[in-house]
Image (cartoon, rainbow, N blue to C red):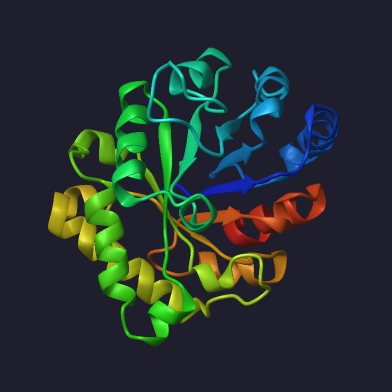
Amino acid sequence: MRKPIIAANWKLNKGPSDTEDFIQSFESKLNDLPKGVDIVLAPPYISLPKATELLAHSRVRVSAQNMSEQDSGAYTGEISALMLKEVFVNYVILGHSERRAIYGESDALINAKVLKAHDLELRPIFCIGETLQEREDGKLEDVLRTQITDGLKDVSEKQMLDTVIAYEPVWAIGTGVTASPQQAQDAHEFVRSVLTDLYGVSVSEKVRIQYGGSVKPDNAKELLGQKDIDGALVGGAGLEVSSFADIIRNGVGE
């Protein structure tokens, strides 16, 4: 049985002060939320120290939203895995569609980041997903297979078990349009089949695959109720304490 994992990706929102307000409010609700779920918050870099300080004794874990594949050097504006470890970060989101589309991150670069994260014992939340055009052109499976195969190149079986995959159809991110539960399940089932091809069923059946793309309290139960959907990577609805708590409550139940 795979333990669900629900993460809030705050993107370019919430400095340290807003982060403190959110965490204090969210922690007050934590005892009323399901226990059998991993909960992760992903603030911007500048808010990570505040988040890890406040959550040091909490069951809520902290993720960065990105990192460099380099350890140090002349890379202006970058943050290394070593720096994230120093502020007690647990996870790191890699390959998000916004990084791919806006900043031109390739599968090869994302792969280097994934390998670096594992080297430093950070758990990657590895994002994949197709555009609307790719889906309409019948390229969904080809796109996902390439992103998985190239993005996870040289990742060992043991490392794969410490990797979370987030399937996010690009056309559903921040648009208010959500993949239907069946569309999401079909994609997740395919992703798991690719993992089976690469690592065998004993690994693929243990890897957690999140769904991301306009997840809200009112669709969380049906989405997370699908056989191969093991959680959610939440965007806008993860910025409000009440809606994020409701997604956890509705999506996981007790």
Image height of 75 relative to 72, above or below = below
Residue at 84% in and 37% down: 25
Q: Quadrant of residue 77?
A: top right
Q: Residue 41's quadrant in the figure?
A: top right
> For this view, does 192 lie left or right of residue 233?
left
Where is residue 71, by image quadrant? Answer: top left
Instruction: Say how many tags the image has.
Output: 0
Q: Nearer the viewer, residue 224 or 85?
A: 85
Q: Residue at x 55, y 18 (%)?
A: 88
Residue 225, percent from left and from top: 50, 68
x 49%, y 18%: residue: 85
Residue 218 rendering spot, x and y as whole percentages:
70, 71
User: Residue lying furthest top in this view?
Assistant: 86
Between 67 and 25, the one nearer to me in the picture: 67
> Does the rendering let one see residue 206?
no
Side of 12 where 90 appears, left or right: left
Using the image, determine if residue 10 lies above or below residue 76. below
Say left or right for 77 vs 190.
right
Could you tell me residue 194's position as x and y percent? 21, 62
Which of these two is toward me, 196 or 146?
146
Q: Position of residue 45 (x, y in %)?
A: 64, 29
Does residue 238 sit above or below 46 in this rendering?
A: below
Q: Relative to 81, is 156 above or below?
A: below
Can residue 24 be seen from the camera position used here? yes
Q: Residue at x 34, y 37 (%)?
A: 114
- The residue closer to the viewer here, 161 or 98, is 98
